[in-house]
Image: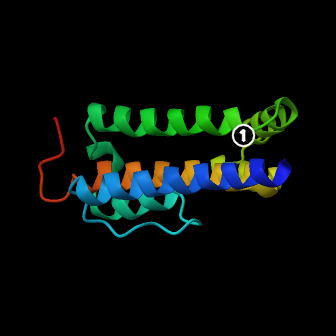
């Protein structure tokens, strides 16, 4: 019974990744897929080389924040209550999202699910930020 459950969970994770990949490939995004280790901070940092964050419109900042908030909610659904408490404590003590996740030392299915959620978030962030190239992006 547990082998079937683990297989089902793994298939669910793979389906999420495949759906996200198809959505972004055929949705007009021309960015290369991110590695699992890539984080949203690196994506924003790469974009910051092209644009100053103060140049982002309020709408763009709101879109980025919404993606991150959804990511946080989805990750918290995967964690148990003690892990959520630890995660929150790590964040409040000055760790960024990825540092706090690393300190949780997740294993097995939970780790795979969280990696899938982060991967999808990274793809969404790349899609939003890739739309900046070649467009006016300020509202002054």
Tell which of 33 and 9 is nearer to you.
9
Question: Residue at the location (42% across, 51% down)?
Answer: 19
For residue 84, above or below residue 109: above
Question: Residue placed farthest to the right in the image?
Answer: 82
Q: Position of residue 103 (x, y in %)?
A: 81, 53
Q: Would residue 104 appear left or right of 137 to someone viewing this image?
A: right
Whether residue 44 appears in this view of the structure is no
Q: Which residue is mark 1?
A: 91
Picture quadrant of residue 84? top right
Picture quadrant of residue 54? top left
Picture quadrant of residue 67? top left
Q: Position of residue 56 (x, y in %)?
A: 28, 43
Total marks shown come to: 1
Question: Residue at the location (71% across, 48% down)?
Answer: 95
Q: Residues within 10 Å of mark 1 (few under 14, many from 20)?
A: some
Tell which of 126 and 60 is nearer to you.
126
Whether residue 27 appears in this view of the structure is yes
Question: Residue at the location (22% across, 52% down)?
Answer: 131
Q: Would residue 70 appear left or right of 64 to someone viewing this image?
A: right
């Amino acid at each position: 019974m547990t082998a079937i459950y683990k297989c089902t969970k793994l298939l669910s994770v793979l389906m999420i990744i495949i759906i996200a990949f198809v959505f972004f490939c055929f949705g007009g995004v021309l960015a290369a897929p991110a590695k699992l280790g890539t984080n949203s901070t690196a994506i924003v940092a790469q974009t910051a080389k092209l644009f100053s964050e103060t140049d982002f419109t309020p709408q763009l900042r709101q879109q980025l924040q919404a993606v991150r908030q959804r990511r946080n909610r989805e990750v918290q659904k995967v964690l148990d209550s003690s892990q959520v408490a630890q995660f929150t404590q790590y964040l409040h003590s000055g760790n960024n999202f990825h540092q706090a996740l690393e300190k949780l030392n997740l294993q097995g299915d939970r780790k795979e699910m969280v990696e899938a959620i982060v991967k999808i978030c990274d793809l969404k962030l790349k899609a939003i930020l890739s739309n900046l190239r070649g467009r006016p992006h300020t509202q002054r």
